[in-house]
Image (spheres, grey):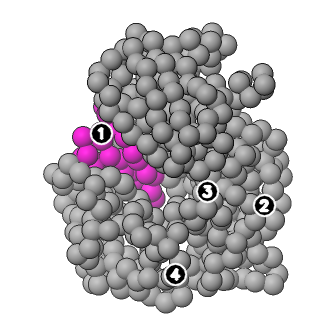
Amino acid sequence: MKKLLLFLVCLIYLNGFSQCFTKINAGYDHSLGLKPNGSLWAWGFGEDGGLGTGTDTNKHSPTQSGTATNWAKFCGGYSNTFAVKTDGTLWGSGYNTYGALGIGSSISHTSVFTQIGTATNWKEVSAGEGFGIGLREDHSMWAWGFNQYYDLGDGTTTQRNSPVQIGTTADWKTICATRLQCCFAIKLDGTLWAWGSNAGAAITSTLTVPTLIDTATDWDILALGHGGHILALKSNKTLWARGVGDFGQTGHDPTTSYANSEFNQIPGLWNAIAVGGDKFSMGIKTDGTLWAWGKNTVGQLGDGTTNNTYIPLQVGTDTNWVSVSCGYQHTIALKSDGSLWAWGDNSFGQLGNGSTTALTLPTTIPIAGCTLSAEEFTLTDEVLKVFPNPAQEELSLNYTGTALINTVVIYDLSGREVYNSHPVVSNNLKASFGIGMLQSGSYILSLKYNEHTVVSKQFLKE
């Protein structure tokens, strides 16, 4: 029982005590992290201004991108970064050739975040090489930038320096772009669509507009890299792969199957997935374990070797991984205690450990202001009680902190929001929520004030 309680106490963001990252994302050769106070931090390759720090220099340690503290979502691309603020505005920094940032011009680059258009309802953004795609709250899809290979899906090869709507339907759920000039997306009905170049065999022919490529209706999460393969999760947590598998990145023996135009299942149940640019894959199973497979030239799989494998290998023995993201040849990941870990290539400081030396094993990265002391765990348990834990049909909470809260959010361990409630502004809240609709597994309950996390705790749904 003691081990269970220790595992359930995590992600402590109380009154600014803990400044660990709540979200992470890896660009091609840089990394990004969001702190609980809404500030965005970046490190790694910055010579095109993609870190948003106001300079064109590499950073070997996490460095704050500007002074804003209202960032909500972000995505690292090829030498650039896109980010959405809590007010729904979309911003970009870095490489802008071909209009890659969508800021209305084709200047070579910018080192500070520049607003993209004037819309205030952006929901999600994904970066390809030289182009980007985004979703708005109304589920419409927009794209901009390089379009020589029908990258944008608007049926033309015309470069777009500003976002243009793709098609006329507003029924898109999630999007994912790749450096190989193709994109995938899932509609609200769970169907899978793709468009762009067929380089790499992730799709079998060039598609000029979004085209249905699979008739299943339970697709849920996507991950694409730059090497021609795709990972996808279904709503039942099963994992599927297709595309080029020359280094085992699709889970196929590369000596018998170089490329697969149909999805093949990779055994297990999974919460999170990530695809590396240089032909490798990572995933977190529902039990919190971390797994890796594919190419391993510089140790990007994190198993302590540089050996390739087509059979997923467990990385270490820990069972508290909650998020993972891959760049070209590096990987970053978060544990449930908020600690940041990194491994693989480090030529530009993208691991954030202050050096440029590659690492073949997950290594914890110091974060300024991040303390995860026993005192904080105790303090969080005092101000936020979640019960019963494990829970079945109903979950109750009792919050007695000093900070105001106005939102209760529940996330699954892939970071997806599965519940959102807006109680009255208070610093003393007792409430109960029906959770019967949630699948069995681990979840994170967060109390927020105006999008800023005040305190969080993990619970188990039986």
Q: Which residue is mark 4?
A: 214
The earlier-in-sequence mark between 3 and 2 is 3
Secondary structure type for disc 4: strand
Q: Position of residue 66 (x, y in %)?
A: 33, 33
Q: Residue at x 23, y 51 (%)?
A: 121
The answer to whether the residue labelled 3 contacts the one labelled 2, judged by CB atoms less than 8 Å apart, is no
Nearer the N terminus, badge 4 or badge 3? Answer: 4
Q: What residue sits right under mark 1 in the picture? A: 86
**Structural distance between the alpha carbons of marks 4 and 3:** 20 Å
- Does 228 sit above or below residue 58? below
What type is the residue that disc 4 sits on? Asp
Separation of disc 3 and disc 1 at Cα?
Answer: 25 Å
Q: CA distance from mark 1 to mark 4?
A: 34 Å
The residue that label 2 is drawn on is 312
- Can see residue 58? no
Q: Nearer the viewer, residue 82 or 30?
A: 82
